[in-house]
Image (spheres, coloured by chain):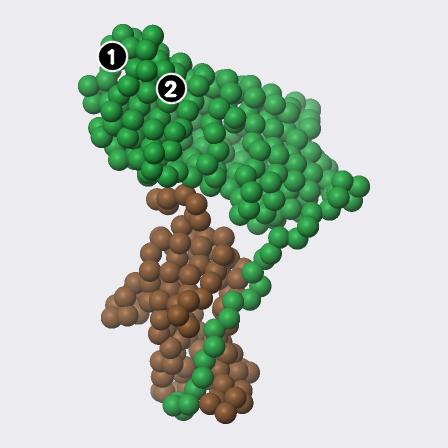
Amino acid sequence: MAFVANGFDITIDRFDHGVNLVWNLKHADGSDYDLTGYEAQIIIKKNAYDPDTTAIFDRTISGGGSSVSFLVEDDLASNPSDTYHYAIRLIKGDFVDTILQAKFKICGNTFAQGV
Amino acid sequence: MEKDLVITLTVENQVKPEPYPVESERVGCTIGDFLGTVDENGTYVEPNSYNFQADAVVVDLSGIKRVNQSGFESAFYFRPMVKKVIADDLVEVGNKAFSNCFADQYIEYEVSFGSLEEISTSAASCFSNAFTSRFGTPIVRFPKLKRVLASSAFQGAFNRSIQPDDVFPVLEEVSGNQVFYNFRSTRNDDVIRFSAVKKITGATSGATNATFVSFNSVIWEFPSVEEITGLVFYSSGAKEIHFAASNKEKIEACDGFDTKWGGTNATIYFDL
């Protein structure tokens, strides 16, 4: 079962396809951030310093509202059990801002030792 | 980007178990509900059933004698409401016939393959990853299964610490690569006993091709084994291998005894 620790570290296991991960963005005053016009990129790599071409998951979606979300699908959940690095980037034209980086852990079968 | 950005992360849509219907409200699923066909010989064929997934509490496969390649592969995967499966007419399975079929269930379901006596060499991966569950332990029975001769037949089949004797009470012969590769959850020093097995024919090469592979260091018990050859155990996955005292002479004469059939880190005992 997917869970979040330390604020933004995510752990999923292979049963978590169908789970939706949602990052809500607000201003410090509590008002919703407007992502209209932005694209949001979610990228998951083994290490932060690895080139993007090595990513196990790399998806860019059109922004809107005040949240960035993506669905955990089987192609992601079935990657080798390991701790990866993920980042959320907001893109607008040539502007690219990494707003968040944290750990993304994929677990094998919950009770058995995986291959 | 503003420096005052506040981000919160939430997880949504985690599927939580729902109470399953009481008996009077159960949803049945029979042959007529499946997309495949069953011929006059009782053979079911659905060549591409991955795209077919059904919701059912009781799955009645009565009348189906043979399921060919991938016939029910992933059929109930992530359709987590199966409570009982009736498959007592099944006598033959093909490659991947039930691979991943009942994976990821949420309740303690029961499934019995009451007539299946042999899994032939052509049925590789027939029950691989078939019986995993998120909650509870499924009750899976092969009450007449005597021979498993297919590679990867039960690879990853259970994610619980089932007792093989409960599932395979009369299993006499096991042959092939990875037949019981990571077939149930294990912890170090687990005792895994196959009481009825008499003959084991392992792989020819490749450490992880062994017939009984555990990734924890477990204790294997084979009180009835009289003949064991080939690559049977994964080196780090066998702490102890126990045989019957009465079979000591036969087993010591088997090919592979000197290499412990791959279980190089194991201690052999003749104390059952």
Q: CA distance from mark 2 to mark 1?
A: 14 Å
The chain coloured brown carries which letter?
A: A
**Kind of residue at badge 1:** Glu
Q: Position of residue B266 (x, y in %)?
A: 25, 27
Q: Which residue is depicted at the point 40% across and 54% down?
A: A107
Please tell me whether residue B160 is drawn above or below residue B51 in the rendered image: above
Q: Which residue is mark 2?
A: B222
In the rendered structure, the answer to whether residue B59 lies left or right of residue B180 reads right
Please tell me which residue is depicted at 50% across the width and 92% down the height of the picture. A29
Question: On the image, numbered disc 1 is attached to which residue?
Answer: B252
**Which image quadrant is residue B177 in?**
top left
Q: Nearer the viewer, residue B250 or B188?
A: B188
Q: Neighbour class for label 2 at 10 Å: few (<14), some, many (≥20)?
A: many
Above or below, comparing residue A6 to residue B255 in the picture: below
Task: Tell me which label, 2 or 1, sits earlier in the chain.
Answer: 2
Residue depicted at x 57% and y 33%? B139
Relative to residue B241, is residue B107 drawn left or right? right
Q: Which chain is green?
A: B
Please tell me in which quadrant of the rendered image residue A46 appears.
bottom left
